Image (tube, rainbow, N blue to C red):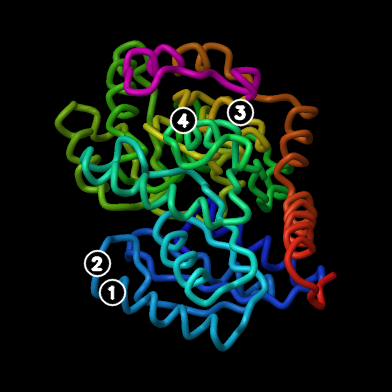
Amino acid sequence: MNIGGPALHVSLLSAGLNEKGYEHLLVAGSESEREGNLADLAEKEGVKLCSLPALGREISPARDISCLVQLRRILRDYRPDIVHTHTAKAGFIGRMAGILERVPVLAHTFHGHVLAGYFSPLKEALFRRLERWLAARTQLLITVSEGVAEDLARLGVAPRKKFTVVPLGLPLRPFLDVRPHDELKKQLGLNEEALLVGAVGRLVPVKNLRLLIEAVRQLASRYPQLHLALIGDGEEREALAGLAQSLGIGRKVHLLGWKRDLPWIYGGLDVVALSSLNEGTPVSLIEAVVSGRPVVATSVGGVPEVLEQGHLGILVPPGDATALADGLRRVLQRRQGPGEGDRLRVAAKFAPERLVQEMDSHYRGQLALRQPTGLI
């Protein structure tokens, strides 16, 4: 339940399924100290949450086998008609448990993937073979964007026709009320003329925030009033602070940690940036667009779909600090974000109600093909 799109998504999906008459159990593992936790959101939504501490992000044969044994016990007691998994590790162990316990329907949502650019070639080849084996035994293969589906098909996980695209469902209504303000700048000790670029998310290597810091350095002489706020936490926090210091812009980079009042945060930013090497559907960009903020982002994974191929923000190549700096410069010159019509349309596209309706239809369709249940 670490802070991010998957935890938001499953909390709202679970709550919606409860309202649709499903009996639903959400099983979640443990997160690192700096990843934050959204378990309170699930509980607020009335979701029945089961904690499985042995399930963690890192690969650990002993813990992972223990987790599989515990999860099989949970499935044996609960006897579900459907097991729906999310994210890589939970997707592997959850589906393995479902296969061993003969669950009628297995579903998995790829919020992104770690099958290219994360590990050594040998590990990547192994993980792809495992995903291919699991995909052949999974009735519902779901991706959150067309880009992720195309990526997975290209990597040989399954044919493109087997993937179903179901966009994220997110709590976006508060972001429609966002209006620009200077209070965040004042809290940071900046004046109203300051230009504040923000990035929201985990401080981890795949987000490539070093690139964003380098882009800000390139613009520092031209825009002496430019500052960067990193909203989030993670393993790279100290390294990013050290990099900013070594580049001579330590006083321009502000590490704010996790913040709960994100609509207020977005209202205080002049630009929202994303510099990732890989993304499924980045929640921060969706929130930024619905908040009416100008956006600059690397063109990876599902980002072009979120920004509608550049209609809702500027797309730049990944790994190119100069291109990112140029994109920021162009946005800073005009500082014009998405209009009201675009904001409303994007909020509707990623509405929780739409997510629940789609998943309900997919679940019932799969169950009807297999065996009668009380849900049909």
Camera-side residue: 326 or 221? 326
Residue hosting label 2: 60
Distance from Cα at disc 3 to Cα at disc 1: 37 Å
Marks 3 and 2 in Cβ contact (< 8 Å): no
The kind of residue on which mark 4 rests is Arg
Distance from Cα at disc 4 to Cα at disc 3: 18 Å
The kind of residue on which mark 2 rests is Ser
Residue 305 is marked as 3
Residue hosting label 4: 154
Camera-side residue: 58 or 203? 58
Q: Does dot 2 land on a helix, a strand or a loop?
A: loop
Residue hosting label 1: 63
Kindly report which numbered mark, 4 or 1, lies closer to the viewer in this rendering: 4
The kind of residue on which mark 1 rests is Arg
Q: Residues within 10 Å of mark 3 (few under 14, many from 20)?
A: some
Marks 4 and 1 in Cβ contact (< 8 Å): no
Determine the residue located farthest toward the right in the rendered image: 376
Locate residue 259, reporting x and y percent. 48, 54
Which of the 4 image quarters holds residue 116? top left
**Residue 310 included in the magenta stretch of the image:** yes
Kindly report which numbered mark, 3 or 1, lies closer to the viewer in this rendering: 1
Locate residue 130, reporting x and y percent. 37, 52
State the extent of the magenta-drawn residues as a range. Answer: 308-327
Q: Earlier in the sequence, mark 4 or mark 3?
A: 4
Residue at image location 73% in from the left, 59% down from the top: 366
